[in-house]
Amino acid sequence: MSSRLLRLGSTIRNRANIIKDGHKLQSTVAAKNYRQTLINVPPTHVTTLKSGLRVASEDSGAPTATVGLWIDAGSRYEDECNNGVAHFLEHMAFKGTAKRSQVDLELEVENMGAHLNAYTSREQTVFYAKCLARDVPKSIEILADIIQNSKLGEGEIERERGVILREMQEVESNLQEVVFDHLHSIAFQGTPLGRTILGPSANIRTISRKDLQEYINSHYKTPRIVLSAAGGVKHSELCKIADDYFGSMKTTYDSEIPILSPCRFTGSEIRVRDDSIPVAHVAIAVEGCGWIDSDNIPLMVANTIIGSWDRSQGAGVNNASHLAAACAEDTLAHSYQSFNTCYKDTGLWGVYFVCDPMKCEDMLFNIQSEWMRLCTSVTEGEVERARNLLKTNMLLQLDGTTPICEDIGRQMLCYNRRIPLHELEARIESVTAKELQQVAMKYIYDRCPAVAAVGPVENLPDYNRIRSSMYWLRV
């Protein structure tokens, strides 16, 4: 009987070793296939034309394409008098040009089956079109016409004032947007990054055609524009088309050359207490780093470790994120999300959460405890999980021609090149627990945070108490 049990035990061990070796082989093969896939991604071709315009494209051979203009100009380049003009220009883009009325423009786009869109951020203005691959030349011609020959008619300007003022009312009802605007206003107070993208209503009511034209003349220069394209596009054809339509744009400045001034971070807080709102909306952040800073990747991994959570998703106490598990176990919040917002020379790294009125203190305590743990005792297992999750999210966000086109345009403005996926994967994979801990100590430990809160925030601790929780005496 004992010899039979010994034989059985030996068989089980052998099978276990075979399974273990099989898993090792599978994981090795999967890793090789993953890296091979990253290397086989179509290359991003970049050409700088004589005009200074950069053309960057990725040809995937798809039947559709996205093509757009990424302009190094946003609300950060405004002053107090013209704050809101960049966003106002975005609204005026589709209101007709010298050779196309608004109706003609809309009919032409619809007849192609294309989609035109635009958005403005604090550092960039973007105009882009989604279309069939064969309609890329026509889409580029329309985009070129829009940014060079917009009519900016007085009647259209007056109509858009009302549209933008209504948009501002909608934004004010979105408390997440409100909190992040408040967060910027106190984190970067007294600097251009502290202003809103839409601008104050007083400016919207007074912005004139002259203001719009001056902004175009001051910032819409070819060296600050990237023509980005992804999908069924041929790079050589794009360069020829771009040369035809943008070659005559002025590259010289009529007045002073705009220089980006640095924006200082100020640890401070703003509270808008309103007990009529059912839940509290709170954001807490420390100063992050700029796009090109080498600390950005470790901060992205740290951001992934904190993660996000929403009670409607059903993730429970076994969630891999410690903060998410605590939220599920003690019902600390309705939802939270960590964020890492980057600009050219600075950033905001923190957490935004929504909670019941008397849960603010408990939620904030858990967030800051988790931050201190990142600084002092984060484990290799957590970092490995975060690295894998970050790489997965990175690839999922590049599903389709539009996100790829956006990634190309944004990276060309931020890095002056597009970082290949295999390089980005290698940089993420190189982050260790020790390096993450060092970076967390640099940006989080004993730093003054910026705090913005809206709603029933009576339970939110005093700022001095929040500041005193940014370090541990036990370290």
Image (cartoon, rainbow, N blue to C red):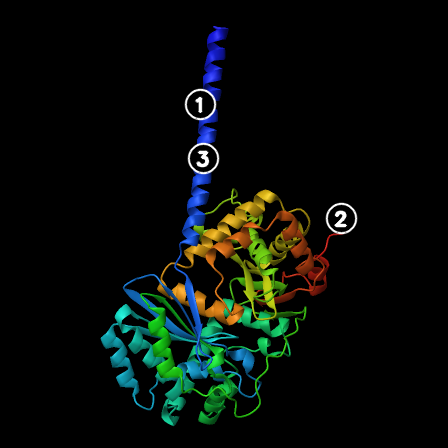
Residue assigned mark 1: 15
Residue assigned mark 2: 474
Amino acid type shown at disc 2: Arg
For mark 2, does the 10 Å Cα neighbourhood hold few (<14), some (14 to 19), or many (20 or more) residues?
few
Amino acid type shown at disc 1: Arg
Residue 307 spot, x, y in % from top left: 53, 53
Residue 257 spot, x, y in % from top left: 57, 86
Q: Earlier in the sequence, mark 2 or mark 3?
A: 3
Residue 57, placed above or below residue 71: above
In three-dimensional space, the C-alpha distance between marks 3 and 1, rounded to whole angstroms, equals 15 Å
Comparing 470 with 346, the one in front is 346
Residue 460, placed above or below residue 20: below
The residue at the point 44 percent across, 31 percent down is 22
Residue 2, placed above or below residue 13: above
Pick out the residue farthest to the left.
111
Pick out the residue farthest to the top.
1
Residues at circles 2 and 3 in contact by the CB criterion of under 8 Å: no
The image quarter in which residue 398 lies: bottom left
The answer to whether residue 180 is visible is yes
The residue at the point 35 percent across, 82 percent down is 244
Amino acid type shown at disc 3: Leu
Q: Earlier in the sequence, mark 1 or mark 2?
A: 1
Residue assigned mark 3: 25
The residue at the point 43 percent across, 53 percent down is 38
Disc 1 element: helix
In three-dimensional space, the C-alpha distance between marks 2 and 3, rounded to whole angstroms, equals 44 Å
